[in-house]
Image (spheres, rainbow, N blue to C red):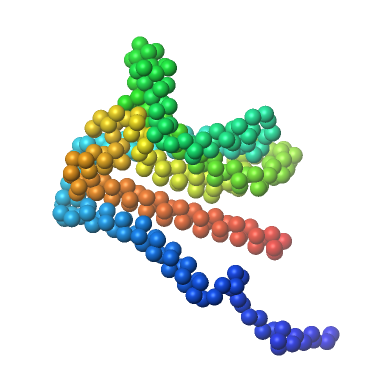
Amino acid sequence: MAAISIPQSAARVTWRNPTGESWWVKTLLIGTSIAFLSLFLLIPLVAVFTEALRRGIEAYFASFRDPAALAAIKLTLITAGIAVPANLVFGLAAAWAVTKFQFRGRNVLVTLIDLPFAVSPVVSGLIYVLLFGRQGLLGPWLAANDIKIIFAVPGIVLATIFVTFPFVARELIPLMQEQGTDEEQAALLLGANGRQTFWRVTLPNIKWALLYGVILCNARAMGEFGAVSVVSGHIRGKTNTMPLHVEILYNEYNFVAAFAVASLLALLALVTLVAKSVVEWRSRRAVNGTISEQAEA
């Protein structure tokens, strides 16, 4: 069989920037991005840790031995520990309903999922005050039964759930819409029941998006300020989360303690960022592996 010769001119391929931009445009864009990141992210972050350690490491750790600080950390973890699993269940159920079923009011449900993104957190806190406050719609009944929601932990949890609700659902809905229902229908035709289809087909396909949404939800839950500030009552040592505790310390001119607690929030944010990057990497790796398997088949 005769060999096919390829002209040298055709064999030489010159790779160019797909956008056709010159090197100085690329340098300008990269430099601008780095400058903005440094000015609005890196420098403030360094300033937080510098101010927190201004009086030494001993004063830094002493800030966390304060009972009020420990109570704020504990309440933040409790709030996130309740809000995140609740939104995991609610977000998964909402995404399943929107993507797997056709029903009246479907567009309304999608709009309601996005509502916390459009409403100010302060307004969402005021909604709960109007519902559960002493002069609110359900206030007299709650007072008669000695149930406290506003200025108590339940109100903080409810407000946090409201502002963090979209994160899980919004990560799942586009992915589940793209995947469609073919695999679930095939599993049902092969004899699988609904529970088996969910655990063996649906969940493996959405696990990385689900984990990504949980990470974002947790980050927002621990750092929420506006809605929690309205419903908490700012009771020191009882209803103050970490962001509210930072505000109180700063208003008292206790800058070292304020920045120490703020640095802990920053560390949690950095841990969240690392977890988010790992999830994105694993997700891309899983997608590339699936594409490779399909190409080999």
Q: Is residue 266 left or right of residue 93?
A: left
Which quadrant would the C terminus be assigned to in this image?
Answer: bottom right
Query: What's the residue at 41%, 36% (across, down)?
Result: 121
Q: Is residue 70 visible?
A: no
Q: Where is residue 17 in the image (x, y as percent from the top left)?
A: 59, 73
Q: Considering depth in this image, is 193 or 241 the residue closer to the camera?
A: 241
Which quadrant would the N terminus be assigned to in this image?
Answer: bottom right
Q: Where is residue 239 in the image (x, y as percent from the top left)?
A: 29, 31
Query: What's the residue at 51%, 58% (across, down)?
Result: 281
**Picture quadrant where residue 147 is located:** top left
Q: Is residue 286 above or below residue 8?
A: above
Q: Can residue 134 be seen in this view?
A: yes
Q: Where is residue 291 in the image (x, y as percent from the top left)?
A: 65, 60
Residue found at the far top of this picture:
144
Q: Is residue 93 left or right of residue 243?
A: right
Q: Considering depth in this image, is 50 or 101 the residue closer to the camera?
A: 50
Q: How many labels does the image show?
A: 0
Q: In this view, does 87 lie above or below 183?
A: above
Q: Where is residue 35 in the image (x, y as percent from the top left)?
A: 39, 64
Residue found at the far right of this picture:
1
Query: What's the residue at 35%, 18% (across, down)?
Result: 134
